[in-house]
Image (spheres, rainbow, N blue to C red):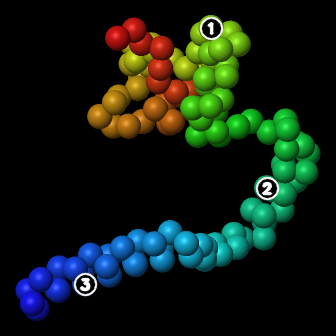
Amino acid sequence: MGKRLFPVLIVVAVLFFVLYKGLVPETQIPATAPPTSTTSTSSKSSISQPESQRPLAIDEKTQANKVADYLQQHARLPDFYISKKEARAKGWNAKAGNLCEVLPGRAIGGDRL
């Protein structure tokens, strides 16, 4: 009977752990504060531009729902998308993963498959 009970206990323990980790929110450790001179310059830039006028990060621009909405309205990809061929011509190397360094604010897309 011990041989049958052990796998059941393991499964119950794993399920409990998965459910517990899913229900308990993770606490985030606060980041250390940058030097005061950097903080003052970054706060000036954030004050000068309202939230709606700040450029979006590439992760925010390429969210599936935003791109899908744009496609439905305009029947084409947003202008920040670039084909692989165009990106390679401008210095992008897929193996190096340097798209953000070579073409900041751009995303790969639009190639015909």
For residue 103, the mark is: none
The mark nearer the N terminus, 2 or 1, is: 2
- Amino acid on which the number 1 mark rests in the picture: Ala
Front residue of this view, candidates 56 and 42: 56
Front residue of this view, candidates 26 and 32: 26
Q: Callout 2 environment at 10 Å: few (<14), some (14 to 19), or many (20+)?
A: few
- 63 versus 47 height, above or below: above
Give the side of residue 96 with respect to residue 38, left or right: left
Residue 20 can be seen, yes or no: yes
Give the side of residue 91 with respect to residue 66, left or right: left
Spatial CA distance of label 2 from label 1 is: 38 Å
Identify the residue at image location x=84%, y=57%. Answer: 43
Check the image and name the residue furthest to the bottom.
2
- 79 versus 58 height, above or below: above
Identify the residue at image location x=33%, y=37%. Answer: 96
Spatial CA distance of label 3 from label 2 is: 53 Å
Q: Callout 1 environment at 10 Å: few (<14), some (14 to 19), or many (20+)?
A: few
Residue denoted by label 1? 75
For residue 42, the mark is: 2
**Residue 14 image position (x, y, % from top left):** 32, 76
- Amino acid on which the number 3 mark rests in the picture: Leu
SS for dot 2: helix
- Circle nearer the viewer, 2 or 1: 1
Identify the residue at image location x=65%, y=14%. Answer: 72
Residue denoted by label 3? 9
